[in-house]
Amino acid sequence: MIGEKWTVYWNEFSSDTYLYGSEISYRAKDEVEYVNVLMPSGTVIKRWYSKTNYQGKRIEPALPMIDGEGRYRLKVSIDCPEGEAWLMQLVFYDKYETEAGRIAVRDEISEFQCPLRTYSYQLELINGGMTRFCFHSVEIQEIENEKEEESEKTI
């Protein structure tokens, strides 16, 4: 069963975006064209946060709060040329801002469960050998456990 769904877009803030040698065109809310032919693989292109310090970064959290007991589906919508690749990485932090785990995502649709100690997390778009791409959105959707619901109905 599918639960609540959140859509994350690439906002026009330059903060936490790899800008060196990059051409970025904001065509629409769900269409951002990014070109950088000299960027090395493994470079973090964009970061989104579930918790921010507004005084320091001047940005609001773009990610929903999630808990370590739930399962979630991540759906990434990025168009890039054939033979080029992107990588999404979820980095989880505990309440002391110590890394509690990380998950790499290479597929358009994947499922994940964050560590129980998770207090906040980041989503990173990483260059996996791309020179250009068009970013649309990332959807995070809660997956409710059907087996638990069925067993509650029979009790």
Image (spheres, rainbow, N blue to C red):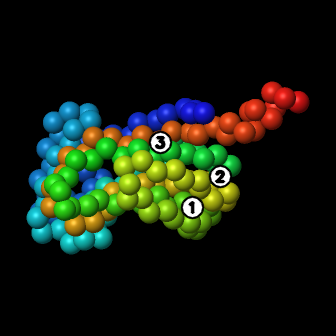
- Is disc 2 placed on a helix, strand or loop? loop
Write down the quadrant of residue 12 in the picture.
top left
Q: Which of marks 2 and 3 is nearer the N terminus?
A: 2
Alpha carbons under labels 2 and 3: distance apart: 14 Å
Q: Which mark is residue 140?
A: 3
Q: What residue type is labelled 3?
A: Ile
Q: Which amino acid does label 1 sit on?
A: Tyr
Q: Where is residue 38 in the image (x, y as percent from the top left)?
A: 12, 69
Q: Residue at x 68, y 57 (%)?
A: 116
Q: Earlier in the sequence, mark 2 or mark 1?
A: 2
Q: Where is residue 5 in the image (x, y as percent from the top left)?
A: 49, 34
Please state, as top left, top right, bottom left or bottom right, where the N terminus lies in the image: top right
Q: Residue under circle 2?
A: 68
- Is disc 1 placed on a helix, strand or loop? strand
Q: Residue furthest top?
A: 153
Q: Is residue 139 visible?
A: yes
Q: Residue 120 carries which label?
A: none
Q: What residue type is labelled 2?
A: Gly
Write down the quadrant of residue 119 in the picture.
bottom right
